[in-house]
Image (spheres, rainbow, N blue to C red):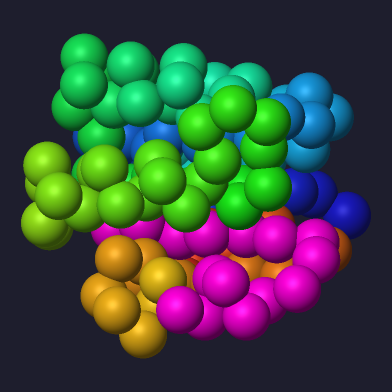
Amino acid sequence: MLFTQPSYDEKNQSILIVDDDEMVLDILSKGFEMYGLNVFKAENGLDGWRLFQNKPVEIVLTDIQMPGLDGIELSKRIRNQSPHTKIAVMTGGNTDIAAELLNDGTATFLFKKPFAISCVCESLLS
């Protein structure tokens, strides 16, 4: 069986992925690269914030629970600076906090780990 790369018109879109789990970060990065996105990645919220300020990204996918600057504060900072950026939060734990980010308009999407990369990619690119 041959693998075919998904086809999207938004080949120039960029995504910032922020997660303190290196394996998750690498898997997600490779998945989004297969969908044709320019991928930037950060292993913590502070590095993610710095990258966001210096790189043009249309989409941010961040873990909620990280040491230091967590995904909640990172999402709020990004939303305040860039109201049109798609922000997706992901968590392997309790979704109540993440749901609050959806309800107050900070985040656009919530993904509960584990999830299918294809579903995340298709949701964020639609």
Residue 29 in view of the camera:
no
Pick the residue in front: 26 or 112: 112
Residue 92 at least partly seen: yes
Quarter occupied by the C terminus: bottom left
Residue located at (46% from left, 21% from top): 46
In this rendering, position of residue 120 left or right of residue 50: right
**Is 15 rendered above or below residue 112?**
above
Tell me what residue is drawn at x 36 percent, y 66 percent: 107
Identity of the residue furthest to the bottom in this view: 103
Residue found at the very far front of the displayed protein: 68
The quarter of the image holding the N terminus is: bottom right
- Residue 8 position within the rendered picture, expressed as x and y whole percent measured from the top left: 36, 55
Q: Residue at x 29, y 79 (%)?
A: 104
Q: Name the spot of residue 49 as percent of width and height, x first.
A: 35, 26
Span colored in magenta: 86-100
Picture mark count:
0
Residue 93 forms part of the magenta stretch: yes
Name the image quarter holding residue 56: top left
| Residue 121 is a magenta residue | no
Return the residue nearer the eye: 98 or 61: 98
Which residue shows up at 67% across the image and 76% down it? Answer: 95
Up the image or down, 43 lies above or below 96; here it is above
Q: On the picture, is 34 further left or further right than 28? A: left
User: Closer to the camera, 33 or 24?
Assistant: 24
- Identify the image quadrant of residue 105: bottom left
Q: Nearer the viewer, residue 123 or 18?
A: 18
Q: For this view, does 60 lie left or right of residue 56?
A: right
